[in-house]
């Protein structure tokens, strides 16, 4: 999905909601446990309940890889079930030397045809650039995360800038706003404002809303741009909201909050 298509979808739905399918078998409602594939059945029910409001789905691959071959199959079937006009994210956080990154890119853009994949930039340009060679696909690069450990490296000073600022500025020069997004945590409004000033045109994948304490008004008022410019990921606060009807209303509530800014 290219930038124009993503922007049109955001405007059509008046939403920047990304639903995270970080499905934990131990948290699935009991009624799904009698199904042949409880995770897949649950994922389908979530997709059915939220697709009216979601512009993206993020599959955290760790929750599927942990189940071995069966988990990879579930991930593939979940991806296939997502309507093709909705943006898809493989939250895999890959990144390695060039020839290995090429294989990771093929994995998530060809074998499993996601629209995007999260990428760790620590190894530098040759670890990220293979993900930027696929037309209509996106690398979503870790920029500023909301976890406690982010202070260990990301917030360390490097002369006149912090490490995360150098990462954002440098990685942005490797691609374009049409194929490069950044993961930006949602918990601190002053940082959201600052990052938007650094990267006025890029899309951000913003986790941290819902169970982690972030909220839609703070994120949108500080980081939205004319194209929407963000995908706000909500996982637990939507998929574990309760019944299918509860999940529907949770997604609807987030969409209504977002529509005010779109």
Image: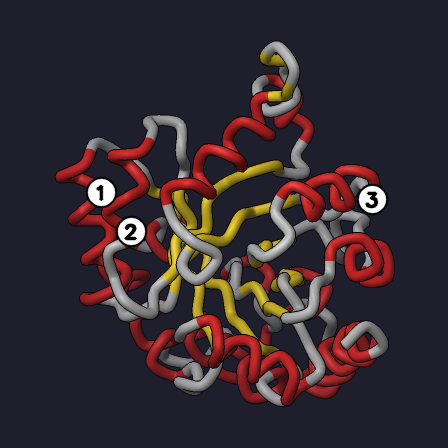
Q: Nearer the viewer, mark 2 or mark 1?
A: 2
Q: Does residue 78 lie above or below 202 as drawn?
A: below
Q: Residue at x 63, y 63 (%)?
A: 229
Foreground pick, 99 / 212: 99
Q: How many marks?
A: 3
In the rendered structure, are the residues bearing label 2 and label 1 in contact, judged by CB atoms less than 8 Å apart?
Answer: yes
In the rendered structure, are the residues bearing label 3 and label 2 in contact, judged by CB atoms less than 8 Å apart?
Answer: no
Residue position marked by numbered label 1 in the rendering: 101
* Secondary element at tag 1: helix
Foreground pick, 58 / 36: 58
Image location of residue 176, percent across then percent down: 42, 53
Q: Based on the displayed image, in which of its 4 quarters is residue 115 positioned? A: bottom left
Q: Residue at x 32, y 41 (%)?
A: 128
Locate the N terminus and report the quarter of the image it occupies. Answer: bottom left
- For marks 2 and 1, the one nearer the N-term is 1
Q: Residues within 10 Å of mark 3 (few under 14, many from 20)?
A: some
* Secondary element at tag 2: helix
Question: How far apart are the alpha carbons under marks 3 and 2?
Answer: 30 Å
Q: Based on the displayed image, in which of its 4 quarters is residue 64 positioned? A: bottom left
Image location of residue 88, percent across then percent down: 44, 70
Residue position marked by numbered label 2 in the rendering: 131
Q: Is residue 73 in sight in this rendering?
A: no
Question: How far apart are the alpha carbons under marks 1 and 3?
Answer: 33 Å
Image location of residue 34, percent across then percent down: 46, 79
Q: Is residue 112 left or right of residue 229?
A: left
Q: Residue at x 28, y 36 (%)?
A: 127
Q: Residues within 10 Å of mark 2 (few under 14, many from 20)?
A: many
Q: Is residue 259 left or right of residue 232?
A: right
Residue position marked by numbered label 3 in the rendering: 189
Q: Residue at x 29, y 51 (%)?
A: 131
Locate the C terminus and report the quarter of the image it occupies. Answer: bottom right
């Amino acid at each position: 999905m290219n930038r124009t298509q993503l922007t049109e979808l955001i405007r059509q739905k008046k939403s920047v909601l990304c639903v995270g399918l970080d499905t934990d078998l131990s948290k699935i409602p009991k009624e799904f446990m009698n199904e042949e594939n409880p995770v897949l059945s649950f994922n389908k029910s979530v997709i059915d309940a939220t697709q009216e409001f979601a512009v993206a789905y993020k599959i955290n691959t760790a929750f599927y890889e942990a189940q071995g071959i069966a988990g990879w199959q579930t991930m593939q079937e979940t991806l296939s079930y997502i309507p093709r006009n909705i943006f898809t994210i493989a939250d895999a956080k890959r990144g390695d030397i060039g020839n290995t990154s090429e294989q990771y890119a093929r994995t998530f853009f060809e074998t499993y045809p996601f629209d995007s994949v999260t990428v760790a930039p620590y190894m530098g340009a040759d670890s990220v650039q293979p993900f930027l060679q696929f037309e209509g696909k996106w690398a979503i690069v870790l920029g500023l995360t909301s976890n406690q450990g982010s202070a260990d490296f990301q917030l360390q000073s490097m002369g006149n800038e912090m490490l995360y600022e150098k990462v954002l500025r440098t990685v942005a020069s490797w691609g374009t706003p049409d194929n490069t997004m950044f993961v930006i945590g949602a918990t601190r409004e002053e940082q959201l404002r600052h990052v938007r000033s650094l990267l006025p045109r890029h899309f951000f994948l913003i986790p941290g809303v819902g169970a982690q304490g972030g909220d839609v008004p703070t994120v949108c008022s500080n980081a939205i741009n004319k194209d929407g410019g963000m995908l706000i990921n909500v996982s637990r606060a939507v998929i574990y909201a309760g019944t299918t009807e509860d999940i529907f209303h949770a997604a609807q509530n987030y969409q209504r909050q977002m529509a005010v800014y779109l």
